[in-house]
Amino acid sequence: MTEDLIRPIKRKENISNLVAKQLIELILSGKFAPGEKLPTEKELSDMFGVGRNTLREAIRALSIIGFVEVSVPEGMFVAKTFDNFYTRKLQMTSRYGYDNVQELTEARASVEYGIVRLAAQRATEEDKRKLREVFDQLRTAQDDNTRRECDVKFHFTIADIAGNGFLKQTLLLLIDGIHDWIRRLQADAPAAHQISTLQHQAIMEAVCAGDVNLAGQRMKEHMDYVGGLYIDIEKQSTQG
């Protein structure tokens, strides 16, 4: 049976996310086969050592992305087929990997560094015009939600300019982490807005100048700065 493979959840934060992550690992490893009926809510709750509401949140998340099918009154089943199997696995890693902030910041920094260097090398005059336009939207944003949207748009515009589909898809898989990252910075470190805007401007200018090395350097500085703030905030939240 699978009881010996399931680790009771001991952490108090993001418990439903941790349950979902363990379940997806069991599915991807084949411990729960495609089409197989899952244990009952009570059995799974007991296995993980969590309440039913927490388990239901985890099952709901897996149902949304197509890993689990819920049928009343038959029960819960592993999906019979998986479309884009590897992509789904990466999506789960991104969505439920917020507890490992170090890995998230390293992943984003590495991806963004490669993307911006390609963008500086390949940007056309039209690309530069679009990037300047997006930066102006970011610079003049009046509220947190607009600023967050413009920030993401700025980085995805650079990804579009880079023209590498694999890198862009990887960045898209990290979007949940990006949203969480920026949201927490805006909530806990308002002084970061002005510095971050200046860093975005430096990145834009390097890309528009076609300076590959400088663009990479400016992006690294930005990622180091924002990532450092995020990690500090995470440490403060866990200590509190």
Image (cartoon, rainbow, N blue to C red):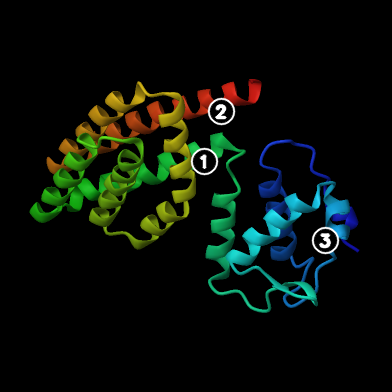
**Percent position of residue 23, x then y:** 73, 58
Q: Residue visible at 52% across and 40% down? A: 104
Q: Residue visible at 27% across and 45% down? A: 154
Q: SS of the residue at dot 2?
A: helix
Residue wearing tag 2: 234
Rendered image: mark on residue 104: 1
Q: Which quadrant of the view contains residue 166?
A: bottom left
Residue wearing tag 3: 41
Q: Nearer the viewer, residue 53 or 155?
A: 53
| Amino acid bearing label 1 | Leu
Sequence order check, earlier mark of 1 and 2:
1
In the image: residue 191, left or right of residue 107: left
In the image: residue 29, left or right of residue 107: right
Q: SS of the residue at dot 3?
A: helix
In this rendering, the answer to whether 129 lies above or below 105 is: below
In this rendering, the answer to whether 34 lies above or below 183 is: below
Sequence order check, earlier mark of 3 and 2:
3
Graded by Cα atoms within 10 Å as few (under 14), some (14 to 19) or many (20 or more), the crowding at tag 1 reads: some
Rendered image: mark on residue 173: none
- Give the spatial CA distance, label 1 vs label 2: 12 Å
**Percent position of residue 199, x then y:** 26, 30
Sequence order check, earlier mark of 3 and 1:
3
| Amino acid bearing label 3 | Glu
| Amino acid bearing label 2 | Glu
